[in-house]
Image (cartoon, rainbow, N blue to C red):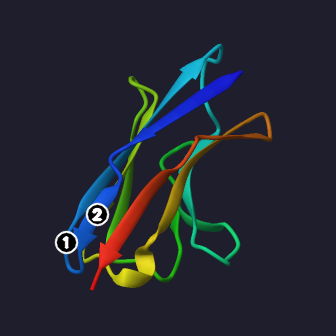
């Protein structure tokens, strides 16, 4: 089992920054990937950024150049640095991890960007 706990969401003005953190715990040696998804009201959950084994990263086109994903393997923690935030970034952000092709999800943290 893998438990994911997010922190760092909140309210910020457009152009501002936030940093999300997600700590993984449980009975595992390593996770295949860790990343972030988001879901705005009325929308489907979408990938924001993911970091796979070996450090390979993928970003949604809408956040490239503004968001940076990083991972501390020693702490089993993944971070999402979000800069130049826009109102359209407003959503619940979910931490995600994969282990042996099984997905795990955090409880979500709200990010609200005011114009």
Tag 2 secondary structure: strand
Badge 1 or badge 2: first in the primary sequence: 2
Residue for point 65% across, 25% down:
2
The percent coordinates of residue 93 (x first, y second) are 51, 57
The residue lying furthest to the bottom in this view is 115
Foreground mark, 1 or 2?
2
Q: Is residue 84 left or right of residue 108?
A: left
Q: Which mark is residue 11?
A: 2
Query: Residue shown at 60%/27% (left/top)?
Result: 3
Looking at this view, name the residue that lies furthest to the right. Answer: 101
Asked if residue 61 shows in the view, the reply is yes
Q: How many marks?
A: 2
Q: Nearer the viewer, residue 7 or 11?
A: 11
Number of the label disc, if any, that sits on residue 96:
none
Q: Is residue 51 visible?
A: no
Say which residue label 1 marks: 16
Q: The C terminus lies in which quarter of the figure?
A: bottom left
Q: Secondary structure at mark 1?
A: loop
- Residue drawn at the location 52% of the way across and 44% of the way down: 54
**Image-quadrant location for residue 104:** top right
Residue 76, percent from left and from top: 46, 28
Q: Rounded to the nearest whole Å, what is the CA distance between mark 1 and mark 2?
A: 10 Å
């Amino acid at each position: 089992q893998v438990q994911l706990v997010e922190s760092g969401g909140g309210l910020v003005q457009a152009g501002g920054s936030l940093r999300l953190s997600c700590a993984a715990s449980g009975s595992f040696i390593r996770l295949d990937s860790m990343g972030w998804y988001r879901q705005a009201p009325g929308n489907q959950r979408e990938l924001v950024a993911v970091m796979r084994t070996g450090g390979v990263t993928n970003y949604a086109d809408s956040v490239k150049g503004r968001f940076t994903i990083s991972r501390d393997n020693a702490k089993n923690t993944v971070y999402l640095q979000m800069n130049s935030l826009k109102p359209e970034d407003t959503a619940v952000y979910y931490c995600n991890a994969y282990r042996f092709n099984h997905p795990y999800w955090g409880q979500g943290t709200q990010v609200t960007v005011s114009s």
